[in-house]
Amino acid sequence: MTPLLLTVSEAAAALAISRSKLYELIASGSITSIRIDGSRRVPVSALHDYITHLATEECAA
């Protein structure tokens, strides 16, 4: 089964960015995340949405 949620480290690796950069994107609202108890998780769909948003911006420029 494909995971629906990724840890911050897994999500950062998937985007090929640092964990600190991912936390910046989460704090700015660019990438959605959730908390489960004390753990931050990033939905895989949020990464797809972020990439689509970046691609749309780039095409418009």
Image: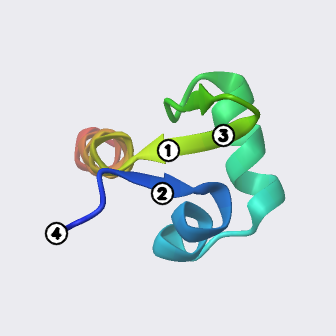
Q: Is residue 51 above or below residue 49?
A: below
- Residue type pointed to by label 4: Met
Which badge, 2 or 1, is on the more N-terminal residue?
2
- Residue type pointed to by label 1: Val
Q: Which residue is mark 4?
A: 1
Q: Which residue is nearer to you in this view: 26 or 52?
A: 26
- Asked whether the beta carbons under mark 1 and mark 3 sit within 8 Å of each other, the answer is yes
Q: Looking at the picture, how far across and down is residue 38, in whole percent?
A: 76, 33
Q: Which residue is mark 2?
A: 6
Q: Which residue is mark 3?
A: 40
Residue name at image x 47 percent, y 73 percent: 14
Check residue 50 in the rendering and tell me which mark sits there, or answer none. none
Distance Cα–Cα, label 2 vs label 3: 9 Å
Q: Looking at the picture, how far across and down is residue 36, in whole percent?
A: 59, 31
Distance Cα–Cα, label 4 vs label 3: 21 Å
Which badge, 4 or 1, is on the more N-terminal residue?
4
- Asked whether the beta carbons under mark 2 and mark 3 sit within 8 Å of each other, the answer is no
- Asked whether the beta carbons under mark 2 and mark 1 sit within 8 Å of each other, the answer is yes
Q: Which residue is mark 1?
A: 42
